[in-house]
Amino acid sequence: MNIWPLKFRERPNGEFLFADDAGGFFSGSRDFLARYAGDALSVADRHFLRENGQTFEREGDPDWASFAYRWARRQSKQQDLSYLILVPTLRCNLTCGYCQVSRAPETAPGFDWNDETLRAVLGFIDAMKGPEIKIEFQGGEPLLRTDLLEQVRAFTRSKFPNSQFVVCTNLQRLGEREWTFLDQPDTFVSTSLDGNHETHTRQRTHDPLVTDTFFGNLAEAVRRLGPGKVSALPTIDVDAPPDFNDLVDNFERHGILSIYLRPINHQGFARRRKSDPNSIAKWNALHSDFIDHLIDRNHRTGRYVEEYYFSQCLRRFLRSGTDDHVDLRNPNFFASDYIVVDHDGQLYPTDEARMLSRIGRVDLSIGTVVEGVDQTKVRLLNQSSINNFDADCIHCVYQPFCGTDVVDDLSRDGRVDLARTETWFCKRHISLFDKVVEVINRRDDAATQSLASWARVPLWGDHMIPVHV
């Protein structure tokens, strides 16, 4: 009997998490680890590993093929381009102090698509294969150029029978034309909601009356479009976080039960903030506390609010093929199924890449919408966009579930060859997956009920976590 190599990580309670390269995992004891490391496995050990899919007799047998299939399912597949992030204007009617995109003032000239860029964008869309396409309008504030949004949507609808549009808007200024554009079955709204009125005013609007306008328009958007058409994301200042109850109350009040808790991004104008080397530890502690808060709250209320990214990590931990979020893809190859078109027609592999280029940190553009994608640049970025062979990742028990973020490494450290364990990305995701493991090993009703909701399963049971002593 051959045993696939196992990686392991000790948990605070003295137990160990074991995982193979295909993401098969189980909880085990120190005694088992000693037998495994000492090549002294018992009959019971071998029986368990066989039942858990971690052994094979010979290459090509059904157990070997099953492992190979599960390993392949863990790898993100190269897909055709089907998702565009379009930035028709970089101008904005707010001046958020931590703006990550380095927006331009509302009256500034030269930060919108010109006629040539618009024609090129439509030509770029026309060359896409389909049959499905998703377009996300970002900015700046994209509704400052609703006319451009209308032209893009009309053209896209004429070519693709299955099209979806997302408008990332601050919801500050909406007239009848803007409402008419948003109030369509294929069009969705994404906005920012940083907590209660005081927090949102402090971080975004700097004016209580402007905040009143936002909350009024948010309520109107939910009323007109329906809560399923409106999503909101809070940006959290780790040194001045909102009250958790106030934050969740505001989301629930608007029918939004998925909250993507995000730290202030180290991009754009936010880079002016003093960098705190302990910020990742603070963030990890805050995020862990928020998960515990949701579990307790959900149990009390019977309304199952999720933290979006934790749920993504949970589902990716439990099963293969969960590649909905690009940070958790592996390989995370750029310019594959999505690409960004900036206000000046430059192409970028990610939204964060265009932010870095905007501040002059590093030019990560990969071509123009007129001339197309520069594959030489893409190949250069993709060399570091896989964790299977990273000197640190290959030893990590969470490698099969994790991803890579070269752009974040460049942003924070100015290099991509830093020891993985020293990067923000790694420290954040080690903490996240540690939290996933901790929560799935709880046995109380509060935890299991939230887990079932977040994992999208009808019932959570002990069978979800293999255990061997």
Image: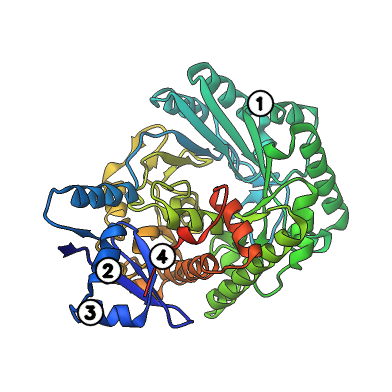
- Which numbered marker is on residue 20? none
Amino acid found under the numbered disc labelled 3: Ala
The earlier-in-sequence mark between 3 and 4 is 3
What kind of colouring is applied to the model shown?
rainbow
Amino acid found under the numbered disc labelled 2: Leu
| Gap between marks 1 and 2 measured at Cα | 48 Å
Q: Are marks 1 and 2 in contact (CB under 8 Å)?
A: no
Q: Are marks 3 and 4 in contact (CB under 8 Å)?
A: no
Q: Is residue 130 left or right of residue 443?
A: left
Farthest residue, direction top: 158
In this rendering, which labeled residue sits more in front, label 2 or label 4? Answer: 2
In this rendering, which labeled residue sits more in front, label 4 or label 1? Answer: 1
| Gap between marks 3 and 4 measured at Cα | 34 Å
Question: What residue is shown at x 35% (from left), y 82% (from top)?
Answer: 30
- Residue 403 at least partly seen: no
Q: What residue is pinned by disc 3?
A: 37
Viewer-proximal residue among 363 and 72? 72
* Quarter residue 242 falls in: bottom right
| Gap between marks 2 and 4 measured at Cα | 28 Å
Amino acid found under the numbered disc labelled 4: Asp
- Which numbered marker is on residue 6? 2
In this rendering, which labeled residue sits more in front, label 3 or label 1? Answer: 3
| Gap between marks 3 and 1 measured at Cα | 58 Å
The earlier-in-sequence mark between 3 and 2 is 2
Farthest residue, direction front: 43
